[in-house]
Image (cartoon, helix red, strand yellow):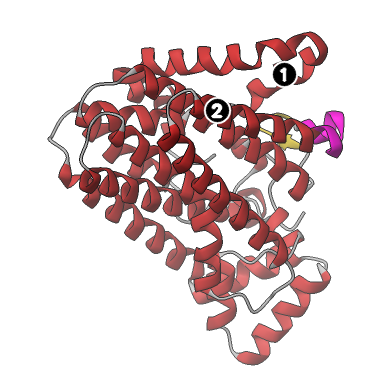
Amino acid sequence: MATVSPATTGGTAPGIDPTHRSGSKAAGLAFAPVAADIAEAERIFDSTLAPHRGPFGPLIEHLKHYRGKRLRPALLLLTAKAVGKIAPAHHTLAAAMEMIHTATLVHDDVLDEADMRRHAPTVNSGWGNKVSILLGDMLFTHAFHLTSTVDGRACQITGEVTNRVCAGELRQVTERGNLELTEADYFAIIDGKTAALTECCGRLGALYAGASEDVAAKLGNYGRSLGLAFQIADDLLDLVGTEDAAGKTLGTDLEQQKLTLPVIHCLNRLAPTESAKLRDAIRTNAEGLGVRVLQALEKTQSIAFAKRRAEELARAAKQELECLPRNECRAILEAIAEWSIRREK
C-alpha cells in the first residue's frame, strides 16, 4: 500500500487532532435528541431486509459492519427537528438514505479492492465481487421502494441524488490514471459521490417538516458543504492515517492513481521537473512511493492547504444554519461540521 502512517513518519497525521474522539459522541450522545427516531429508522431498515434473511442470512447480518455513525439519518432527522416536528415520513426517508449510503459502500469496496471496512472484512473479500454488486443493487432498489411509500416528490428527489452519486463514482473511476486532474475536477467528483447524499438529507429533513423551499435549500447547502469537507478529511486520512484507527483499508487512492486534493495541490506547486518525476512514481507505483509523496506534501504544505479548504467548507456549512432558531439540534449540526474535519475514521 502507498499509505504513509504516523509510525513511518514519527508523528500523528498532519491536520488531524489525535485527541479528538468524536466518533463515539457522533454515534451516541450528540444525537440524543433524535436517538429514538434513529432507532425507528433502524427498525425500518432491518424490517425491509428481513425477508432476505432466510436465503441470505449471513450476508444480511454482515451489513451491520457497514452501518457506523448513522450520520446521514441523523442529519435528516436533526434538520427536521430543528425546523419543526419529526413525522413518520422522516423515519422512512432516513432508512432509505442509510440504504443508499450502505449500497455505495458495498460497491466502493469492490471498486477499491478493499479488504477491510470498520475493522471487519468487506463483503467482496468474503463473498466476492458478483455478490457485492448484486447486494448493493438490492439495497438501492429497496431504498427506492421505501421512498415510493412516502410520495412522488420523495422518489424524484431520491432519484436525482442517486443519479448524482453514481455519476460522481463513475467519473472518479474513469479519471483514474489521469495525473493531470485539476482541483475543479476533484470537487466535481466529490460533489457527486459524497456531498450529494448529505445535501439530500438536509433538504428532505427540512421539506418534510414543513420548511419553506428557501430554508430547505439552505439546509441542503449545509449538507453539501459538510459532505465536501468530510470527503477532503477522508482523503487526507487515506494518505496519512492508520488502518487501525480508520478501521478500513487505506492507501487505495495512490495505489489506484486516484488524485485527491492534497496530491493535486502538491503536483501543481512542485517545480516542473520534480512534479514530472513524482507523476512517474505514482504512475508506476514506485518503491517507497508513500514516503516520497509525504515528503513532497510537506515541502509544498499541501496537507495544510487541504486542511484549510476543509475548514473553510465546515465554516460555510455552519453559516447556512443561520436560517434556524438557536436550539439544541442546531448546536449539534454545528458540532457535526467541526467533527467532520477532525475525525480519525
Q: How many marks?
A: 2
- Amino acid under disc 1: Ile
User: Which x, y percent locates residue 68?
Assistant: 55, 28
Q: What residue sits 34% from the left and 41% below the top?
A: 203
Indicate whether residue 235 is drawn in magenta: no
- Single out the mark in the foreground, 1 or 2: 1
The answer to whether residue 267 is left or right of residue 214 is: right
Residue beneath disc 1: 60
- Amino acid under disc 2: Gly
Q: Secondary structure at mark 2?
A: loop
The answer to whether residue 22 is left or right of residue 297 is: left
Predominant SS of the magenta segment: helix
User: Which x, y percent locates residue 71?
Assistant: 45, 32
Residue beneath disc 2: 68
User: Which x, y percent locates residue 76?
Assistant: 37, 32
Check disc 2: other Cα within 10 Å, few if <14, some if 14-19, many if 20+: some
Disc with the residue nearer the chain's start (1 vs 2): 1
